[in-house]
Amino acid sequence: YPQCLKEIDTPPLVLYIRGELTPEDSLSISIVGSRDAKDYGRKVSYRLSYQLAQHGLAVVSGLAKGIDTSAHRGALEAGGRTIAVMGSGLSFIYPAANSDLAEKITESGALISEFPMDVKPKPKNFPRRNRIISGLTLGTVVVEASNRSGALITARLAGEQGREVFAVPGEIFSELSTGTHQLINNGAKLINTVDDLLNELPPYALNRIQSDVPTSSIPSVETESSQAPPIEKSDPKPLATQPSSEVQQPIQSVPPPGLTPDERTIFDAIEVPSSHIDTIVRTTQLPISLVSSTLLMLELKGIIQQLPGKQFH
């Protein structure tokens, strides 16, 4: 059982594994983003993953189409290790189109899940598994994500877990850049090259990675080989505590139709202007694990928003 998962809130009680987890996998980075990624995002994800694998880091993602798929492939084709965290039991590969990729991952990494083998992929499972994606790693990179993307939940969880949060800038006219640029505005570390990421790793990790690997710039929007101009780096505040410069308004003021009983109970417990998660737990008398996973689902649906300090509105 990975030691790093013991450090997070609500660690999975058990992990089902196909393949092998090794002690070296503690040196890992997660790469997440849109399922509907553009060519630019797929190239960035692949190349960044390839370069991380060259340096001896494992790459963690969620086996979804788009950014996740490119991340897994990049690591494998560099001869590195990659781990896929599933939103289903290991008997169900989702999406089915990635069955061959999943088999290759088991040969040089692992498929892992907290769900029993026969659990089918369900929407509510995926936000829940995101805490494992972020919790397994030293940091999370978001490549192409809209402002409603589930990848932002993974980034937020990474910040709350004390992990690094990185974002790759994108095309300013693309909806798939709104989420990544929002992360950068809120304190995520902007990366143009793999070196930008490596330089943020803790000293013990830097001492263990391969440093004599030639690297190239992450491809820009225009061409795969062009390089973005250097950007002066600052010292951003941690993502989990960085306040927004805007006054955020609740997405929904009345409960929308189609909520489950638990979702409706938790929605009704959120007061104006906001409620802390501990207050919601006391009001609803529901287990904190259920409240946390339901809040994630409501956030993913765009029904509520999270503010700094585990406040929700």
Image: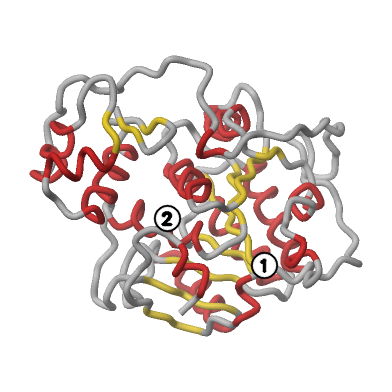
Q: Residue at x 23, y 20 (%)?
A: 272
Question: Which colour style is shown?
Answer: secondary structure
- Residue lying at the far top of the rendered structure: 247
- Which quarter shows the N terminus? bottom left
- In this view, the residue in front, 1 or 6, is 6
- In this view, the residue in front, 271 or 47, is 271
N-terminal of the pair, mark 2 or mark 1, is: 1
Residue 169 image offset from top left, x and y in percent: 67, 34
Answer with left or right where residue 89 lies relative to residue 256. Answer: right
Identify the image quadrant of residue 47: bottom right
Residue 69 image offset from top left, x and y in percent: 55, 59
List the residue tagged with mark 1.
75
Q: Residues within 10 Å of mark 1 (few under 14, many from 20)?
A: many
Residue 229, placed above or below residue 7: above
Residue 158, placed above or below residue 222: below
Answer with left or right where residue 37 lies relative to residue 249. Answer: right
Residue 242 image offset from top left, x and y in percent: 55, 31
Q: Mark 2 to mark 1: distance in Å?
A: 20 Å
Q: Secondary structure at mark 2?
A: helix
- Which quarter shows the C terminus? top left
Q: Residues within 10 Å of mark 2 (few under 14, many from 20)?
A: many
| Dot 2 amino acid type | Asn
Residue 98 image offset from top left, x and y in percent: 47, 66
Q: Secondary structure at mark 1?
A: helix
Residue 131, placed above or below residue 169: below
Task: Please name which of the two marks, 2 or 1, marks the residue nearer to the observer.
Answer: 2
- What's the mark number on residue 18? none
Q: Residue at x 13, y 31 (%)?
A: 268
